[in-house]
């Protein structure tokens, strides 16, 4: 969003205070743009938190003073701006208005309460005073746990590190997961632990800021349900290589691209003289084996048996929250039914085998299977926890463990590829993944995807980017619509349909030759 910020900040503040409903967003954008710009990733461990203009420090007292004379909607927006300025390095100057912020908590509207929670979460040194007004902010249990986490100083045991998003209170860890946390947290240096703690804090600020900003502009947020877990029950330890029979001609060796020999109990590459392990209907193409095949199979079985519940947890609890922060789904514009309908509508006309790329825990694999049939479908993902859940959900769909950046399939072997809510998991290599999709598609084959693009509002964009995940230590990286279209064209794909509310991007493209 391009805004004119040539006027003095005091004039822009006066304009904002007096703006009518139709001009409020534009006036706020001009004020924000005069004082602050979104942050940029400096390296893998440092997010700069935003950039302040030379006018920002002097404007802070005016912003604080203006809070008393504004309605809740305008005051809330100023609180958001003050929080952004604090994140950009002026925390002490912004903290000077603490008494005024605390006074606003008395009788705060729900929207103002969300904005206050976001700003006050930046002052852990005032934890007791800040928590003293928490009851007047209208926070739900998730809000409260995020609020409390941001006001907490990391202890010697590094309690809760890595489990702050989307809220500390959603994490119900198994014994194995607790042991996993102790191992990786204990291996960190103090400096690494502090960096991770800071990134956790910024991630939660990003969530709180996005929620507050939505509430101020649109009203209450809507809770959208996540996917239901598959039925309980263990899957067979048998390789189930019979499931791969329909795809034997398409499967290719990751090393030499030659055809694979799918037998009754083993998968081998004749050219490389190596084999690949399989169990539970999961073929692991990430590791070739020679004489140690039995050992490798035992390792795979052990890994599957010890897999934590992340696959289940992601779909039921974490994915709906991710759709909020990446896609702006705070108002419930996209439902599970909407996603199911788009997938089914987009892939129904195609012939030939279908690849579910980045299939995850299989919720949308089941939609594809119901549309084209399990025998035509092949699921691919790199994560064993996800594939373990997928096999429980769709036991007749074969699964391949492999990278989307080097798809182990022959050229022009697929009639359709679906990549649903996965492309942003490898944003730096998204062009490579799309090129691979173009390679494996037959002429006339379709590519259906859903991913996320940057919001046009720089405030929203900042909060989107402030989310840190293990795969992206420098902050979340989304896409521009234009670059997605450019990568598709470079892969020989023509866009047939492109849509999506908020920051969602639903695309169906076709391989032209």
Image (cartoon, rainbow, N blue to C red):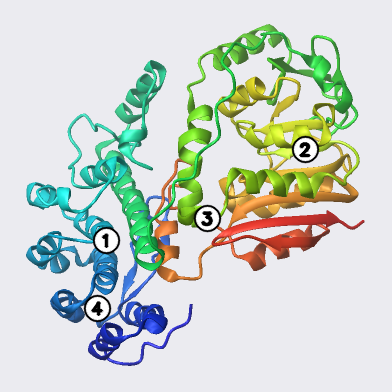
> Mark 2 — residue?
355
What residue is shown at x 50% (from left), y 34% (from top)? 316
Ranked by sequence position, the earlier of labels 2 and 4 is 4
Ranked by sequence position, the earlier of labels 3 and 1 is 1
Tell me how far mark 2 sits from mark 3, CA to CA. Answer: 24 Å
Find residue 115 and name its label.
1
* Contact? badges 2 and 3 (CB < 8 Å): no
Find residue 56 and name its label.
4
Query: Mark 2 against mark 3, which lies toward the viewer?
Result: 3
Tell me how far mark 4 sits from mark 3, CA to CA. Answer: 30 Å
**Vertical placement of residue 231 versus 335, above or below:** above
Tell me how far mark 2 sits from mark 4, CA to CA. Answer: 51 Å
Task: Please indicate, yes or no, whether residue 247 appears anywhere in the rendered image.
Answer: yes
Task: Please indicate, yes or no, whether residue 420 appears anywhere in the rendered image.
Answer: no
Mark 4: give few (<14), some (14-19) or many (20+) Cα within 10 Å: some
- Find residue 184 and report its horizontal and vertical position in percent: 37, 28
What residue is shown at x 25% (from left), y 38% (from top)? 190
- Find residue 72 and report its horizontal and vertical position in percent: 24, 69
Query: Mark 4 against mark 3, which lies toward the viewer?
Result: 3
From the viewer's perspective, tell me whether residue 353 is left or right of residue 163: right
Ranked by sequence position, the earlier of labels 1 and 2 is 1
What residue is shown at x 71% (from left), y 49% (from top)? 342
- Find residue 114 and report its horizontal and vertical position in percent: 28, 57
> Mark 3 — residue?
327
């Amino acid at each position: 969003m391009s805004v004119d910020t040539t006027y003095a900040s005091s004039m822009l503040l006066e304009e904002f205070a007096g703006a009518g409903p139709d001009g409020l967003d534009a006036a706020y954008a001009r004020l924000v743009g005069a004082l602050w710009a979104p942050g940029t990733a400096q390296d893998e461990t440092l997010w700069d938190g935003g950039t302040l203009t030379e006018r920002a420090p002097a404007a802070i007292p005016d912003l604080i003073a203006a809070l008393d004379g504004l309605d809740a909607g305008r005051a809330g927006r100023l609180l958001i701006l003050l929080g952004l300025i604090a994140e950009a390095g002026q925390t002490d100057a912004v903290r000077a208005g603490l008494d005024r912020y605390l006074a606003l908590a008395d009788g705060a509207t729900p929207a103002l309460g969300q904005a206050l929670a976001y700003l006050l979460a930046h002052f852990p040194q005032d934890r007791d005073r800040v928590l003293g007004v928490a009851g007047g902010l209208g926070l739900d249990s998730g809000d409260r746990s995020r609020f409390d986490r941001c006001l907490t100083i990391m202890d010697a045991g590094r309690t809760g590190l890595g489990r702050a998003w989307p809220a500390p209170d959603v994490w119900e860890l198994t014994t194995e997961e607790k042991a996993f946390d102790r191992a990786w947290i204990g291996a960190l240096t103090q400096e690494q632990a502090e960096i991770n703690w800071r990134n956790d804090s910024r991630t939660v600020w990003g969530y709180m800021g996005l929620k507050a900003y939505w509430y101020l502009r649109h009203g209450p947020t809507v809770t959208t349900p996540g996917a239901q877990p598959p039925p309980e029950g263990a899957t067979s330890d048998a390789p189930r290589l019979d499931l791969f029979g329909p795809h034997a001609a398409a499967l290719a060796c990751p090393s030499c691209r030659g055809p694979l020999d799918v037998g009754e109990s083993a998968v081998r590459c004749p050219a490389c003289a190596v084999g690949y392990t399989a169990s539970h209907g999961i073929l692991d193409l990430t590791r070739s084996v020679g004489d140690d095949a039995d050992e490798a199979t035992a390792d795979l079985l052990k890994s599957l048996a010890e897999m934590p519940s992340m696959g289940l947890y992601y779909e039921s609890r974490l994915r709906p929250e991710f759709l909020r922060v990446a896609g702006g789904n705070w108002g419930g514009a996209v439902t599970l039914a909407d996603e199911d309908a788009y997938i089914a509508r987009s892939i129904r006309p195609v012939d030939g085998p279908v690849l579910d790329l980045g299939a995850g825990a299989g919720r949308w694999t089941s939609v594809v299977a119901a549309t084209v049939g399990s025998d035509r479908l092949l699921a691919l993902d790199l994560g064993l926890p996800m594939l373990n859940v997928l096999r429980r959900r769709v036991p007749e769909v074969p699964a391949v463990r492999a990278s989307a950046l080097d798809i182990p399939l022959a050229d022009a072997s697929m009639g359709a590829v679906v990549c649903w809510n996965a492309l942003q998991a490898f944003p730096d290599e998204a062009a490579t993944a799309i090129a691979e999709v173009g390679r494996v598609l037959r002429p006339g084959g379709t590519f259906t995807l859903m991913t996320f693009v940057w919001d046009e509002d720089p405030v929203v964009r900042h909060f989107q980017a402030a989310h840190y995940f293990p795969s992206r230590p420098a902050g979340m990286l989304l896409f521009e619509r234009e670059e997605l279209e450019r990568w598709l064209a470079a892969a020989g794909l023509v866009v047939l349909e492109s849509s999506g509310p908020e920051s969602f991007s639903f695309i169906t493209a076709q391989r032209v030759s």
